[in-house]
Image: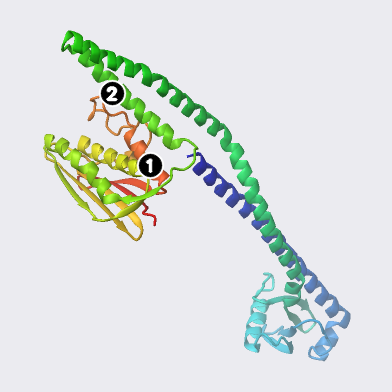
Amino acid sequence: MISKLKKNLTILLSALFCVLYIGGLVMFNWGKYESCLMDLRRQVRLEVSEVGLKQIENSHGAALELDALDYSIFHVKKKDAKVELYSNHLPDIDEQTQYEYAQKIADNWKKPMEFWRITNITKQGKSGRYVVLISVYPAVRAVIPTVVASIGLALVGMLLLILLTNLLSKRMVRPVEQTLSAEKKFMSNASHELKTPLTVISTNAQLLEQEIGENRHLVYIRQETDQMIEMVNKMLTLMHLDAPVEQTVFKRFRADEAVFDVIFPMESIAYEKKLTLESEVEEGMELTGDENQIRQLLTILLDNAITYTPEGGVIRIIASVRMRRFQLSVTNTGDEIPKEQQERLFERFYRADEARVNDGSHFGLGLSIAGSIVANHHGKIWVESKDGQNTFRVLMPSGK
């Protein structure tokens, strides 16, 4: 849980900071490019002013020589606002496209216009306006070193941001981690402390029953202590599964045999409740994992199905290995589980319907243990509920 929280926080903070950082670099480079375009237009205006519009008009644009730039000059007639090409030094753009650009500028004097690969300036002369189309490549070339440097900075910055957010997420999660650690330690200590006196009470109750004979008060004591011992054992199991110890050594085992070893003893319980128990288990399938935990997982799911299936209902177990994935499903007929409750089923001490099962034998820990077992095997578990059926599905790597 804590590692997942750290991971999600790191991803979220890294994404946020990276977007802000890269966005800042993009805005900086765009501002640099716009600045270069302004310098380019200023340079052309100075050249036009030095040569003079009269000389440009008399020479049909030949007097203006911008050796370092690609450009073209258009004259806009006063009478009909039609453009006329004076000089063309834009080899990368065909004349028809240049005419279209120039005409759009002539028709929209007051509106600044920019085009793909082209910027422009306008000048007012005695015989009409002049439009100079200028290639933006000089501005692009001027900004390329900045862009390259920004890419380098972006890569280095993103790496540093990821490291920083990782450290930041650890500090943010630390109080939660300490609280959960203290809670787990308390639960573990309390469970261990409770287990011994409960065992003593149960044993003494048995001895008293042997001495004085059957007594309903002793029966009640034994029933209650047995239920408490069961709850304590489940709590200790959860503590063991959550403890940050070395990972259990997984071994290869016959998964079909493990499944049948759980199903067969449960058939008598299902028969007593007048339930139909069906199974479809792939023969010879193998799984790499903790065999005892897998047995416990199926026991929890099957016990849960038997508990919540009404008399005359059907329970179906399907287990197989497909594409190196162990697939397990336990389906039972009965009341559908509301969608808002489905995600909470794997929380500790959560029971979807307190009224349905009130025999004291279920404490809301079974499905939480199942979820922890699946997580330890790098799989996922979820529930589906529709058409009067509830299905618990498990998907995990089968290993090699």
**Image quarter in which the C terminus is found:** bottom left
Can residue 234 be spotted in the picture? yes
Q: Residue at x 27, y 19 (%)?
A: 224
Q: Is residue 389 left or right of residue 192?
A: left
Q: What residue is pinned by disc 1?
A: 373
In x, y percent, where is residue 12?
A: 55, 48
At which x and y percent is residue 141?
75, 74
Can residue 385 be seen at all in this image of the molecule? no
The CA distance from mark 1 to mark 2 is 22 Å
Q: Callout 1: helix, strand or loop?
A: helix
> Is 177 rendered above or below residue 143?
above
Name the amino acid, label 1: Ile
Residue at the far top in the pictured view? 212
Tell me whether the residue at label 1 lies in contact with that at label 2, contact meaning CB atoms closer than 8 angstroms: no
Reading the image, the residue beneath label 2 is 227
| Residue 56: image tag | none
Residue 283 sits above or below residue 79 on the image: above
Quadrant housing residue 231: top left
Question: Could you say where residue 116 lies in the image, as x and y percent from the top left?
Answer: 64, 76
Amino acid type at image mark 2: Gln
Q: Is residue 23 left or right of residue 184?
A: right
Spot the residue most to the right: 50
Q: Position of residue 258 (x, y in %)?
A: 27, 46
